Amino acid sequence: MQIKNLVFESPFFLAPLAGYTDAPFRHIAHDWHSACAVTEMVSAEGLARNSGKTEDLLARYEGEEKLIVQLFAPSRDPVQRCLDRLLKHDPAMIDINCGCPVPKVVKTGAGSAMMRHIDDIYDIVSFLCANAGCPVSVKFRLGWDSGSINWPEFASACASAGASMLTLHARTRSQMYSGKADWTQIRKLKEMFRDTDVKIFASGDLFTAEDGISVMRQTGCDGVMFARGAIGNPFIFTRAEELLKGNSRVISTDEIRNTMLRHLDYMIEHYGSEVGCRDMRKHAVHYVKGLAEASRVKAVINSARTRQDYLEALSLLEDI
């Protein structure tokens, strides 16, 4: 798949997830054939004000060539002020978050609140397309609530401003992450841009590799953003890739053990042993979900402080 000058080996991307898609997680996803990954949400205002914590979100793992940086902002002003600092990190693409529904983001006028301000998203995208020197994408929702479904107008504004890629999370802001994503709207979005170069990505209720294949077949979308379905499950990318070829890929317990440990090692390398081992817990409990003896393993993981603690936890897993 190609988006402007960027070529990707598959249509399966790691979506932005606040608190999760740091460099170690992107690294392990890449190991399992994620075609590209998006950073956690980066505050344009924080970057403009030289916030070290904000800039830390842009740190790459060694060898990470293509990185999509996701910004959130309520208007062009902070985007314009942060651009020079952002471009020093050489993003492959800049994505604008117009989908995050959480109150602390929405109250700033960013995230899903942008669905109410089509003129502002047009302004941001057109500015970036003229000045960033890389493709621009936008992630958005169906609308603010069921009474204000405006994704067609929103998508048209983004494309008219020059966006090369559009990702639709097929829920409204008021739904948050509840209810069922309406994939029929993704199909309609793809139909709107069928005869253009704008790539359409799906988001929402993509918890398994099978879900990824289903949404592509049902909607004709160009790509899939795996989010929550990839937590503790970087295998989802390889499995989706194989399913697309008509093959089935079973993940063994040994592969789960080895991948989880490699992810832990990436965390330790990036953050140091204390922080890396502590922060790995939120990933590790998902790696073992559904496996025999998972409850015993999780009990050890939840208090793990060293690599040895994780080794002891994983020794409790039964082979499959």
Image: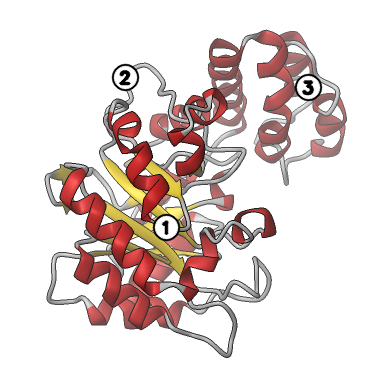
Tell me the amino acid under the disc marked 1: Ser
Q: Residue at label 1?
A: 75
Kindly report which numbered mark, 3 or 2, lies closer to the viewer in this rendering: 2
Mark 1 or mark 3: which comes first in sequence?
Answer: 1
Residue 68: x and y, percent? 34, 41
Residue 201: x and y, percent? 35, 62
Mark 1 or mark 2: which comes first in sequence?
Answer: 2
Tell me the amino acid under the disc marked 2: Gly
**Left or right: 220 in relation to 214:** left
67 to 198, vertically: above or below: above
Q: Determine the CA span between mark 3 and mark 2.
A: 30 Å
Near-viewer residue (87 or 75): 75
Mark 3 or mark 2: which comes first in sequence?
Answer: 2
User: Extreme bottom residue here?
Assistant: 147
Q: Is the residue under label 3 in contact with that under label 1 (CB below 8 Å)?
A: no
Kindly report which numbered mark, 1 or 2, lies closer to the viewer in this rendering: 1
Q: Secondary structure at mark 2?
A: loop
Near-viewer residue (44 or 247): 44
Q: Secondary structure at mark 3?
A: helix
